[in-house]
Image (tube, rainbow, N blue to C red):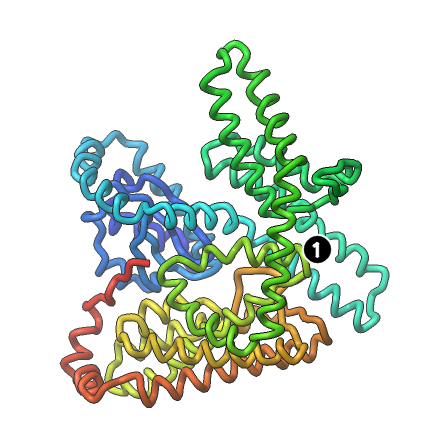
Amino acid sequence: MSTDTPENKNRATAAAILPLVGGADNVTSVVHCMTRLRLGLRDRTLVQDDALKALPAVMGVVEDDTYQIVLGPGTVARVTPEFEALVEEGRSTPSMTAEELAAEGAALKAARKAKNATPFKLFLRRIASIFVPLIPALIGCGIIAGLNGLLINLGWLPTLTPALAAIASGFMALIAVFVGFHTAKEFGGTPILGGAVAAIIVFPGVAKIDAFGQTLAPGQGGVLGALAAAVLAVHIEKWCRRWVPESLDVLLTPTLTVLLSGLVTLFGLMFVAGEISAAIGTGANWLLDHTGAFAGLVLGGLFLPLVMLGLHQALIPIHTTLIEQQGFTVLLPILAMAGAGQVGCAAAVFLRLKNNRSIRNTIKSALPAGILGVGEPLIYGVSLPLGRPFITACAGGAAGGAFVGLFSMLGDKVGSTAIGPSGWALFPLLQGNHGLGTTIAVYAGGLLIGYLVGFAATYWFGFTKTMLAELNTPAADAAADPEKPRETVAA
């Protein structure tokens, strides 16, 4: 009987990766996002990039402050706990090389941190660390909200729809608490205190409080207010730890933290964050209402470079704020067009490089994921290493974004009830200001435009004659397949 169970397969993948990153003693931290296994490493020089990229389960690698191995959605969530278990097992036996590894990698690690630890990059990483853990709940609740809306429109199961509405809305009603919890955790405070302060924002009793001549509303300030309140709580807590006697710490520190940050939140942060949140919603709607086609062109065309630079993380709070205010974010469907341009680009590369088995095999394995909105394999395995096709993929994204933006100018807004998925995986999350059929049609039209323009631009302008001659020769294919690694890109 076969023993190739999913559990065995995931453990085998983890076991294959571990020695190639320097073994358990070289791993300092293990986390994952939607598609990537993110590792903190003592000594980067011990990593065998070529062998890692050759593993069937590995779609690519990305170097940043952490070493990121792209495994794809679903897979990464199953491989990570197996990898963590193997790391712990590897550390259970005392090793004589741990100190040597730490000493050998100290200089390299310090240099890399100095290079990547700019204030702006650190800010974006922290934003991602706060909001990325919330994405699975946003996706699940968003799909349930979409299903509930469909049932209501069709008049089906009227006794069930109130229950579905409660299930879909519960998380969003308390999202500020989760943001406060993760913010405090990320900034070095006590997570539960951050959550406690952020909970003030959604407490119904704030409706009895006047601030700046206005009566507060529950939820005013949203996730931005929760983030600011939790950051303030962390600073107050750290201040208390320095000055409060140890014998009184357990009583005074949490009390002062919640009291002081709570008062500032009620009589300052909620109002200010509420004004900023309202401005974000107004600004996004104005932008698409008045410059929709141009805005879509710019956003769709620049999103792939933003992803490469890690700047797309700055959009997460904006998406979340729009979802809180309007029930959906109008920006995500436009940004998703970048993935459509990438898919069209990959199809053109496949046809143009008929003699390059390596690149064509990469496209065959990565294209289904790209259609479903997971773009890293195509980005790092195909378009970015080739250079010009990355630019033509951006052209496809710009065209699709302009299409969706144009319809927004005409009054047909297309939004997503959650962040995370794109491509075809975004269809269950679509919502707009008109019927679901219109919303789906506009989004599907944008994808089609992105595919076609990305394909045409790449087919006709993605390669020079020299590139085609070099990449289509048997020698080039032999050099790339199976041993030559794809270039590792620093995100």
**Residue 349: % across, % down:** 32, 83
Q: Is residue 29 left or right of residue 238?
A: left
**Residue drawn at the location 52% of the way across and 79% of the way down:** 402
| Other residues around mark 1 within 10 Å, as few (<14) / some (14–19) / many (≥20) | many
Residue 121 visible at all:
yes
**Residue drawn at the location 56% of the way across and 38% of the way down:** 181
Q: Is residue 57 left or right of residue 99?
A: right
**Residue 56: % across, % down:** 33, 64
**Residue 481: % across, % down:** 21, 73
**Is residue 428 placed above or below 81 in the rendered structure?**
below
Quadrant in the picture for the N terminus: bottom left
**Is residue 215 placed above or below 158 in the rendered structure?**
above
Q: Nearer the viewer, residue 23 or 424?
A: 424
In this view, the residue farthest toward the left is: 475
Quadrant in the picture for the C terminus: bottom left
Q: Which residue is mark 1?
A: 168
In this view, the residue farthest toward the top is: 247
**Is residue 285 placed above or below 102 in the rendered structure?**
below
Q: Callout 1: helix, strand or loop?
A: helix
**Residue 356: % across, % down:** 24, 82
Q: Nearer the viewer, residue 35 or 269?
A: 269
Residue 1 visible at all:
no
User: The disc labelled 1 sits on which kind of residue?
Assistant: Ala
In this view, the residue farthest toward the right is: 159
**Residue drawn at the location 40% of the way across and 85% of the way down:** 455
Q: Is residue 390 left or right of residue 483?
A: right
**Residue drawn at the location 83% of the way across and 65% of the way down:** 157
